[in-house]
């Protein structure tokens, strides 16, 4: 069965009109304290000399954005840096130093703590090297907490819709297995009774038997695509079933290394499974691959899924709308979980799909590592 995953995660509109592109403000004669851009956020000038940061200009909107007065920022940059969330400190400094090193605009997004409240801010600044030891940034700091909350609400809504969709798939799979299965079983019993009267060599009865068997197999296949029963045993078993089903149907061997895909919440497990399912579907349709490698690894707080094929590969310019739709669908599923999906491909050298998803550690032990010889038809 071909499963279509529709694009259901809407893009998040900006919470206000974006400010103009950040330019070098150092030559602007407008007083910094009342700069026109301060209506969007904190307009600032930040210098770094010998590794030491110092705000040299700041608009009066500093208090509104980061909970510090402009005077406090100018006295010491430590007051601001100290408010950056501990989990975002490393990324803040890394992005700042990367901007200084490469001379590229600074664009950073992270959390700060202001009077017991967590705010999300976005910093965008133009960079200028003044001399061998001093770098200067002129830019704007914007409070994006509202946009982040809206984005979170949209993702919660999308997660609720996806749970409802999976529940409906499970219901349809059960109904197909129970009701259609019972009808086909009853029909086969009736054919057996007719065979006693007409003989075992009746051509029409043999044809009817073959049709019933084919319908039964098709029903099982459709039910499995809607909601594989093996997925109830865990993500590891679900992925192994998916790899085996793929190999049997298309004759393409799949090697696997699955570690730590055990106790995951239902939404995470199902979305990772659906991403892998879509990836295998794309390989079957477009890749002309001779082999596929499936790898799952888990570290504290993160689960990684890699699917690699040795097929035709592609370039973004030659990517069809169908391929683009599949990638977008998989990426939206990863984003729903707060994760990322990257796809690297080179023509005639295959495609590598990398999914990284945060996950909470569960009290129960994870599945034992599962690896072995390639699954083949």
Image (tube, rainbow, N blue to C red):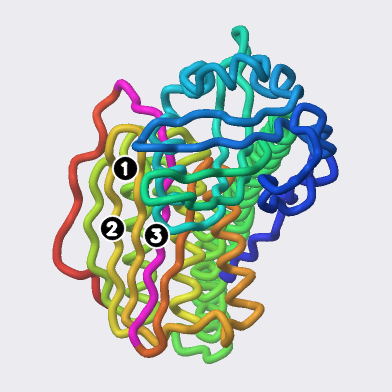
Residue plotted at (33% across, 85% down): 349
Marks 3,1: beta carbons within 8 A: no
According to the image, label 3 marks what residue?
Answer: 354
Q: Residue under circle 2?
A: 295
Q: Is residue 212 above or below residue 33?
A: below
Q: Quadrant of residue 347?
A: bottom left
Residue 69 is marked as none
Dividing the picture into quadrants, the one containing residue 372 is bottom left
Other residues around mark 2 within 10 Å, as few (<14) / some (14–19) / many (≥20): some
Would residue 72 be found to the left or right of residue 157 on screen?
left
Query: Between tags 3 and 1, which lies in front?
Result: 3
Residue range of the region highlighted in magenta in the rendering: 349-363
| Disc 2 element | strand
Q: In 3D space, how far apart are the residues under numbered discs 2 and 3 (Cα atoms)?
A: 10 Å
Residue toward you, 130 or 202? 130
Q: Is residue 220 above or below residue 77?
A: below
Q: Position of residue 176 (x, y in %)?
A: 61, 55
Residue named by callout 1 = 261
Residue in front for this viewpoint, 191 or 121:
121
């Amino acid at each position: 069965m071909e499963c279509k995953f529709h694009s259901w995660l809407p893009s998040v509109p900006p919470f206000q009109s974006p400010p103009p592109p950040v330019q070098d403000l150092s030559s602007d004669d407008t007083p910094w304290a009342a700069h026109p851009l301060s209506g969007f956020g904190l307009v600032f000038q930040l210098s770094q000399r010998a590794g030491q940061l110092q705000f040299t200009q700041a608009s009066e909107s500093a208090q509104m954005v980061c909970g510090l007065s402009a005077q406090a920022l100018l006295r010491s940059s430590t007051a601001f840096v100290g408010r950056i969330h501990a989990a975002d400190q490393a990324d803040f400094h890394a992005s700042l130093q990367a901007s200084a090193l490469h001379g590229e605009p600074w664009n950073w997004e992270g959390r700060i703590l202001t009077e017991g409240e967590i705010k999300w801010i976005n910093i965008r600044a133009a960079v200028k090297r003044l001399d061998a030891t001093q770098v200067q940034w002129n830019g704007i700091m914007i409070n994006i907490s509202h946009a982040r909350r809206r984005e979170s609400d949209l993702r919660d809504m999308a997660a609720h819709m996806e749970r409802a969709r999976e529940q409906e798939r499970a219901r349809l799979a059960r109904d197909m297995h129970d009701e259609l299965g019972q009808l086909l079983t009853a029909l086969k019993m009736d054919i057996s009774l007719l065979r006693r009267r007409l003989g075992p060599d009746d051509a029409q009865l043999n044809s009817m038997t073959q049709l019933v068997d084919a319908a039964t197999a098709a029903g099982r296949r459709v039910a499995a695509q809607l909601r594989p029963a093996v997925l109830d045993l865990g993500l590891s078993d679900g992925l192994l079933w998916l790899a085996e089903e793929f190999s049997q149907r298309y004759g393409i061997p799949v090697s696997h290394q699955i570690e730590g895909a055990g106790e995951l919440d239902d939404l995470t497990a199902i979305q990772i499974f659906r991403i892998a399912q879509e990836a295998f579907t794309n390989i079957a349709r477009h890749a002309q691959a001779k082999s596929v490698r499936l790898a799952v690894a888990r570290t504290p707080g993160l689960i990684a899924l890699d699917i690699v094929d040795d097929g035709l590969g592609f370039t973004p310019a030659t990517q069809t709308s169908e391929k683009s739709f599949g990638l977008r669908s998989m990426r939206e599923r990863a984003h729903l979980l707060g994760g990322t999906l990257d796809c690297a491909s080179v023509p005639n050298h295959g495609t590598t799909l990398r999914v990284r998803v945060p996950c909470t550690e569960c009290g129960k032990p994870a599945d034992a590592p599962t690896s072995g010889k390639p699954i083949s038809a």
